[in-house]
Image (spheres, helix red, strand yellow):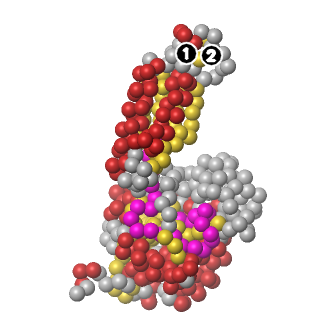
Amino acid sequence: MEQLRKQLDELYPDIVSWRRHLHRNPELSFHEEKTAEFVADKLEQWGIEVRRQVGGHGLVGTLRGGMPGRTVALRADMDALPIQDEKTCEYKSQVPGVMHACGHDAHTATLLGVAKALSDARERLPGTYVFLFQHAEEMNPGGAKSMIEAGALEGIDACYGVHLWTPFPSGHVYCRPGPMMAAPDEFTLEIIGKGGHGGLPHQTVDSIVVGAELVSSLQTVVARSIDPTEPCVVSVGSFHAGSSFNVIAETCTMKGTVRSFDPTVRLEAKRRIELLLEHTCAKYGATYKIDYRLGYPPVVNDPDEVERCFRVAAAAFGADAVHESPLIMAGEDFSYFIEKVPGCFMFVGAGSEEHGIRHPHHHPRFDIDERAMRTAAGLLLELAVDAAGQAPVASIS
């Protein structure tokens, strides 16, 4: 392990270089052709078996160690976001309107570093290591589900993933057993009234008035319909209606999201939103359309694998750098992987006030403290080796 740690230190400049290349050349979900080619070429250069086009632009790399052991999967996402990069650094995105605003470039570079270190030490390693480079994490449904359907998890005993997270201080590790990230559901509501002249409101059904009341009413879903001990969020993020100062809008469209952890809470929130929409529209004589989409499930970590994470991370980085994560209302389709096999998702802090890394994820000036990639690489590598060398549960007396 000391040799592997030293090799990661030596690889760190390459990891930074790979990350900056990917940051300059981002690709949106379902369009990760060049990113996937870049990754696959690296893996094949290092003698790692590669399956391309797994469920889309997903990649599966397989490395067999020289000694018996379990099969462990490590996952990184590759896609970028439709956001204009407003940074001024030399690795700023070169693609107009597209940038890595969530750290997926760093996740990909980090896992490449892990793959290279493990490939160089393969003869001395137990088990088999599977590298899952996933497309389309930012979409619903994302690439995880299609990769699983294409056989990406066949023969896997455990699966791990890391998200670099700027709200946490750089280099610190966070995880928790059970639910950790929310189910991200989304809805589009269209209110259909009767348009008309702004000076003759009595002849209309004002969709903006209906929509405004509905936005306020939706706040009662959490405040008055959900058990206050259960986390849940309902947010309207988009509201569009009308085009002129003196015309009452016939239609109003709003989009929003619901975040929850518990399946019962999830369905109750959906039921209440539909009921409020129906009755608010009926009150004013409007009609409606609704498109309510259940997103991917919450991220639920296996308690035993979280215990492994805490043990390995404390040994590698010190107990003071390892913490129980708070619940995070963001969603992640890594949830599909650990629905199928034991595993856990982890955060490595990537924020640094000292270096001006303070912007949140999905912000036009988002960046990371690149030193966090070394922590993330070490965490994934040491977890993988530890899990691969573990005797199968059935053989333990």
Query: Dot 1: within a 10 Å radius of its alpha carbon, few (fewer than 14), some, or many (20 or more) residues?
Result: some
Disc 1 marks a residue whose amino acid type is Gly
- Nearer to us in this view, 347 or 385: 347
Say whether residue 47 is left or right of residue 394: right
Q: Is residue 219 above or below residue 346?
A: above
- Nearer to us in this view, 168 or 374: 168
Q: Is residue 388 above or below residue 36?
A: below
Location of mark 1 (residue): 195
Query: Dot 2: within a 10 Å radius of its alpha carbon, few (fewer than 14), some, or many (20 or more) residues?
Result: some
Give the number of marks. Answer: 2
Decide whether the magenta segment is chiefly helix, strand or loop: strand
Residue shown at 31%/71% (left/top)? 155
Residue shown at 42%/50% (left/top)? 228
Tell me which numbered mark, 2 or 1, is placed earlier along the sequence.
1
Please state the extent of the stretch shown in magenta in the rendering: 161-186
Location of mark 2 (residue): 247
Q: Is residue 272 within the magenta segment?
A: no
Q: Is residue 183 within the magenta segment?
A: yes
Residue 381: x %, y % from top left: 49, 79
Residue 111: x %, y % from top left: 53, 71
Q: Secondary structure at mark 1?
A: loop
- Mark 2–mark 1 contact, CB under 8 Å? yes
Q: Is residue 91 visible?
A: yes
Say whether residue 325 is left or right of residue 90: left
Q: Is residue 57 visible?
A: no
Return the mark for residue 108: none
Q: Is residue 52 above or below residue 378?
A: above
Disc 2 marks a residue whose amino acid type is Val
Q: Secondary structure at mark 2?
A: strand
